[in-house]
Every structure is written in C-alpha cells, then in structure tokens.
Image (cartoon, grey):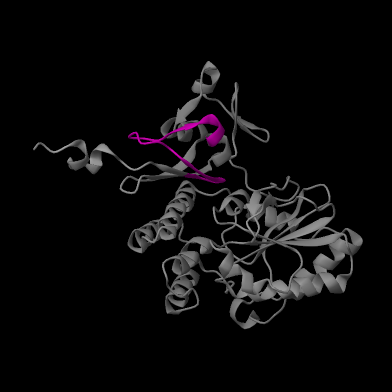
Amino acid sequence: MSPGPENDEINPADHPREWVVLGEQGRCPGGHEDRPVISLMDAARLTGWTPKPQGWCRDEICRPSRRLASGDVGEITIDELVVDLGAAVMIDDEHRIISIGGSESAPAIAPLEAAPNVNLPKLDGARAGLLDGTDGKRMVVAFSSWCGCRYDLPLWQRFVDEMGDPSLQIVAVAIDQNPEDVAPWVEDVTFDVFLDPERSFCDAYGITNVPTVVWIDEGGDVVRSNSIEFADDTFVDFHGSHSGPHLDQLRSWVTDDRAPDDAEDLRADRHPATAAEREGRAAFRIATELAAHGDRPAATEWVARAESLAPDDFTIWRAGLQLIGEDPFGPKFFERYEAWKERTGQAPSPI
C-alpha cells in the first residue's frame, strides 16, 4: 500500500519556522519567507519611527523613504526598513531571528532636550510611559539586579521621605530581563519601578552603565544627563564616587530650582552610539531571545558577539554574565573590570 500523506516524510526545509523580528520597542512575527516582511504598523511599533508620506519621522527628524513616498505601501521588508532608517541590524539565520537596532539619526539625550517617554512594563506586567502620571521634578534611576546599586533603592526611598517635598519623585528602571530578579530589591519602595527587557530605555537614553541617574524637570526636559551616582558611600572604596556632592546638588535643585553646576560638562560628554555599539545592542537582543527559549549555547555565542562590538557597555557584557548563567559578581567580572580600567584609563567604576 502506498503511503498516504500522513505517512510522508516532512522536509523541515519546506516548512521553515517563522521569523521573529526584534526592535527597540518590542517584537513581531515576520512570516516564513527568506527575509521577513512586516506591516508598517509593526515597523512603527518596533522602531518608534512613524511612517508618513515624507518619510519615517520621530520627533523633529524625518528620513526620506522612496517606498513611503509612493503611497502604496502596506508592508515593508526588513532590508528596506533598515536602509530607510539607517538602523543597525543583526541576523541569526539559523534561528530565524532579526534584531533591528538604533538609527544613526537617533539623538543623544543631553541637558535642555526633551526626555523620551518610553513605554515600559512594570514588575506586574502593566505597561506605562516612563514619565506618565508625574507633574513635578523626577530623577530616573537606572539600576540592575546584577549590580551593587540594587542596594540603593531603599536608600533613594529614604532620601525622598526625608526630603518631604512632593515636587520630587523617583522613577527606577531595572536593566533586567525578568521581574523575579528585581522584585527582592524593591520590596521596601513605593515609587514606580519599570523593567527594560527589550532595552528600549537603554537605547533611548544611551545607558551603558549602572547606576545612572537622569534629572527631568516639570516640563519634561532633561536637566542633568546620564551620570553615575550612588545613594550612599557603602562601596566608595571600590568605585571611588562619593555620594555627598550629588545629593547636595539634588537638594538644591528640588528646594531652590538650581541646576547642577556640571550640566554642561555632562552635555559635552554625551556622544551618539557608534555603529558597532548599536550593532552590539541589537546582537544582545538576539542573545536574550535565545536565552529565553533555553538555548544557552547559542545565547552565549551572541553575548560574545555583542561584547566584541560594544566592549565598554557594562549593560551588555556584565548583564551577559547573568544571562548565560555566570556570576556577575564573580572572578570573570573582576578580571574584565580590571582589563577595562587598564584599557580605558578609567578611574574606579560602579559595581
């Protein structure tokens, strides 16, 4: 008897798995073709760029697009999209994952610029804008469960309580993948704590290390851009950054509306990410996707690729240790940390 269709051997090559497309602000399916094709709506959601007849637009920037100008566009290939946006892209053909990184036109956040209201999940999964629901001054604190700065969260709560000034609010963002890793460190805080699993906050604000603080005024503009600050001096012998000067400046800003004296220095220090750094962030998204599906060997390979592209980004190479099951406080971290200091000539840095 001839075998029926149910007995025919299936060739996996004839039924390739669906592509997954990862972006700055989410993920979407990309179909089964050789290269993903996604809707304009998904493209906008993933990248934060809005399709208009004049091109892809975000804030005051528009990038021209021949396809959009034609007016007859329902879908767009990933190849076309990354060319239009000048975006970084990393591709894992074996696992059919494409990661779209940041655009070369993405502005670095600096004093006097509007703070991006990035949409992020809270620890309970509910999503909200980073700056929603707060009208006063805000200090955004970026931290991680793999960093000693995790101990600062209750201290920031105590600082706000002792200030007793409702015009100051703390907003924390955990550069982590899982809420379970973060929850134990924020049990005693009442301010909002967000999670950045897709690294959209890191990309929007140019975060490469933790703890990083950003001051944002009542109008939503950045007053003090990315700076490494601590809530006390517990680890000062290691990182060399005393908390007192920053806390004094913070009090002056809240009570006297006095901007920090070093705001212009911080502005001068802000540089857009290089092409390699943007590719490194896109590569790390692929690593997190693979790790989430239990493929540690493949995730380890992509972590290594991300590290090689962005060697000075602690939120990639140190977070990568945790992602692949290594100890982010262990010997590998300290070896890498000492090598980083020697290579860059940097003073002690956060733990």
Say which of 118 and 344 sits in front: 118
Q: Position of residue 306 (x, y in %)?
A: 42, 56
Residue lying at 32% horizontally and 45% vertically, measured from the top left: 93
For the N terminus, give its image quadrant: top left
* Residue 3, quarter of the rendered image: top left
For the C terminus, give its image quadrant: bottom right
Q: Is residue 328 above or below residue 68?
A: below
| Side (left or right) of 150 relative to 167 | left
Residue lying at 63% horizontally and 74% vertically, measured from the top left: 184
Q: Is residue 334 above or below residue 87?
A: below
Residue lying at 58% horizontally and 50% vertically, measured from the top left: 200
Q: Position of residue 235 (x, y in %)?
A: 63, 80
Q: Is residue 222 above or below residue 32?
A: below
Q: Does the stretch in magenta take in 31?
A: yes
| Side (left or right) of 284 relative to 204 | left
Say which of 110 and 211 sits in front: 211
> Is residue 56 among what the camera can see?
yes
Residue lying farthest to the left in this orientation? 1
Say which of 199 and 26 sits in front: 26
> Is residue 231 among what the camera can see?
no
| Side (left or right) of 171 relative to 330 | right
Q: Position of residue 87 (x, y in %)?
A: 49, 39
Q: Position of residue 344 (x, y in %)?
A: 50, 66
| Side (left or right) of 241 relative to 181 | right
What range of the chain is rendered magenta?
Answer: 22-42
Q: How many marks?
A: 0
Say which of 120 and 15 sits in front: 15
Q: Does the stretch in magenta take in 233?
A: no
* Residue 176, quarter of the rendered image: bottom right
Residue lying farthest to the front in this orientation? 1
